[in-house]
Amino acid sequence: MSQPQPPVINQPSTSPYVLPSIGTLAAAKAPVFVTPSGYAARITSWTLTNTDTASRTVNLWLTYQGVSQRLFGKDVALLPTNMVTSDSEVYLPAGSTIEGNASAAAVVSYVITGELILL
């Protein structure tokens, strides 16, 4: 009996259970990864890269059951072409969200990697 396949998260991946979530941060707080129903997620790393020629500030939050907590400091400054990264693992239950924003839209790129876990 085959296992059901998880939904595609933002970008196709080589394995249905490995997730890259790739994009750019908006200027207003917005979801960058949503754990799908029926799955938990194990985030293994995330990277934010300032692609702009000006310094930008960035924020990331983990939101679960209506409660948001920062994944790192408030309004972290990124110099032009610099990045901030973390390889600390985070377990996300079904229905949890990673949200982010930057001081300017579409100039800070993000990559979130990990795997989905069928519940």
Image: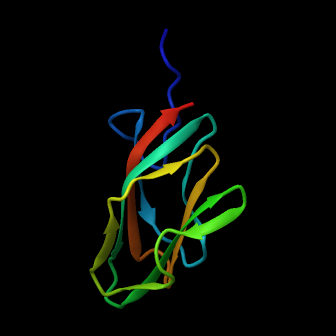
What sort of colour scheme is used for the picture? rainbow
Residue at horizontal 59 percent and vertical 56 percent from the top: 97
Residue at horizontal 39 percent and vertical 47 percent from the top: 114
Residue lying farthest to the right in this orientation: 66
Q: Left of 97 or right of it: where is 9? A: left
Task: Report the quarter where the C terminus lies.
Answer: top right
- Where residue 33 appears, as percent x and y from the top left, is 52, 55
Residue at horizontal 32 percent and vertical 77 percent from the top: 51
- Where residue 96 appears, as percent x and y from the top left, is 61, 52
Residue lying farthest to the top in this orientation: 1
Camera-nearest residue between 95 and 101: 95
Camera-nearest residue between 88 and 60: 88
Residue at horizontal 60 percent and vertical 73 percent from the top: 29
Residue lying farthest to the left in this orientation: 81
- Where residue 94 appears, as percent x and y from the top left, is 61, 43
- Where residue 20 appears, as percent x and y from the top left, is 39, 49
Q: Left of 6 or right of it: where is 86? A: left
From this view, report whether residue 11 is shown above or below residue 52: above
Residue lying farthest to the bottom in this orientation: 54
From this view, report whether residue 96 is shown above or below residue 23: above
Q: Left of 53 or right of it: where is 7? A: right
Count of numbered tags: 0
Camera-nearest residue between 2 and 105: 2
